Image (cartoon, rainbow, N blue to C red):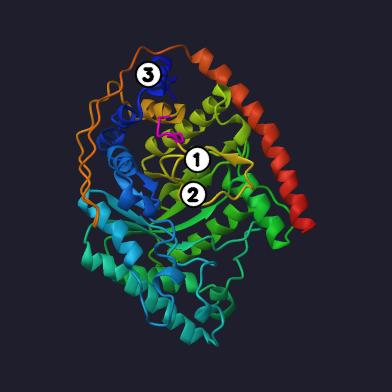
Amino acid sequence: MRALTFGVLLGLVVASQVGAQSAGLRPAADAAGLNFGAAVTLGALDADDAYRQLLVDNVNMVSTVSEVDFGVVQPQPGVYDFAAADALVDFAADNELTVRGHGLISPDGLPDWIVGGSWTAETLGTVLRDHVTEVVGRYAERNPGVVTQWDVVDEAFLPDGTVRDSLWRQVIGDDYIRIAFEAARAADPDALLFYDDFYDDLSVTQDAVDSGLTIVPGATADRSDCALVPKCAGVQSTIASLTAAGVPIDGIGFQAHLLSPDPVDFSTFSGWVTDLGLVWAITEFDVPVPVTEITNPDTLAFQADAYATSLSACLDADSCDTFVVWGVTDRVPPTADTTGGAFGGALWFDATDVPKPAAEAMADVLGVVEPEPATTDVAPTEPTTAPTVTSPSAEQSDDDSNAVVALAVAAGALVVVGAVIVLARRRTSDAKNP
């Protein structure tokens, strides 16, 4: 990773909100051939011009959050509601963005009629197949070439590497994964189809506690070999068997809500995916920090390094061309806080839409040297008729030394370590003593 440019950093921090938006990363991502995306807060698209401009200036892909969840799309048997998903896809199409459909089939978010139904493997398998066909097929026909990737199956494995005992598995068995992927491929032969899951140490630990399992290792900087992480080893074995049997799985998504003070090295952790001849993507990326440290320069440097290192891992790999951050600005996060208020500030623009060091770090990785004023106009989103926001550019300065950055990152790591340990202990205590 190249050194952070402190002169540019200073210019970005003191820039006005509108001016900051001009130093968009989208042109650089396009030039690098990178699908550089962000999860979208749908409610902000209609009325928040500044938010829409941030998206259009900075990313070339947007990701659904819950808009294609089973319970959202099919709340009643055979009754489909595509209003939310259509709004997101239409925004993307109008602004020449692509879409990543996240969470098509997952253990959670199922409607009552599924959870409370009386099923056989055959009847529930038919429901699963028909649902995937309807959702994926809709956008293949309605917006060809816009939804280019799907997380077909999401979070199907437990921390110990076994398949999660979801309703799909209870009734259909492990074969539900095959059924979902085959239906998706038949509905859209051109989209890339992913299996998506999380492996970072603290998330795996919390999932083990929540599931009543023995705590097992998750991925860290020192544990970036898939074989050392039981969940990853289980996913690897299953995906290898499925692809060998001809199941149409194109890639693996690595969720990355990085709470750990020593984040996983994706350049090493992804090796098994490449060995299987698949592609991989970094998905749901963000780096929450202790709320007491949100403005601490050392902590922000630590956060920036995690952003830059992970982006570099994807950009440098022949088998990765997708990096999706779980939002753009701390002002409008796509999902609610899950840390009890202990962590926040996870994204690359702050709560006033000013770029953080993480934004500059990613710009550095992408080779942004002298950002030009934003030239991408936001297409109006119905029923919005507000004018396009156009921004002047932020100025940049010369590079500073690597040594300063290294010290800042190290200090930030120490700050985060203590807060993370406290949070993990509190979570474990709360789970055992509700």
- Give SS at disc 3: helix
What is the quadrant of the N terminus in the image?
top left
Image side of residue 226 versus residue 285, left or right: right
Decide: is 27 above or below 430. Answer: above
Image side of residue 30 versus residue 363, left or right: left
Between 54 and 312, the residue placed more toward the observer is 54
Residue where numbered disc 3 is placed: 11
Q: Is residue 130 magenta?
A: no
Decide: is 44 above or below 178. Answer: above
Nearest to the eye among marks 3 and 1: give it. 3
- Mark 1 Cα shell of 10 Å, populated few (<14), some (14-19), many (≥20): many
Question: Which residues are drawn in magenta?
Answer: 348-355
Name the image quarter holding residue 308: top left
Residue where numbered disc 2 is placed: 254
Label 1 is placed on what type of residue? Phe
Image coordinates of residue 197 in percent, x first then y, are 52, 55
Image coordinates of residue 404 in percent, x first then y, are 53, 14
Label 2 is placed on what type of residue? Phe
Residue where numbered disc 1 is placed: 266
Image side of residue 12 versus residue 236, left or right: left
- Give SS at disc 1: helix
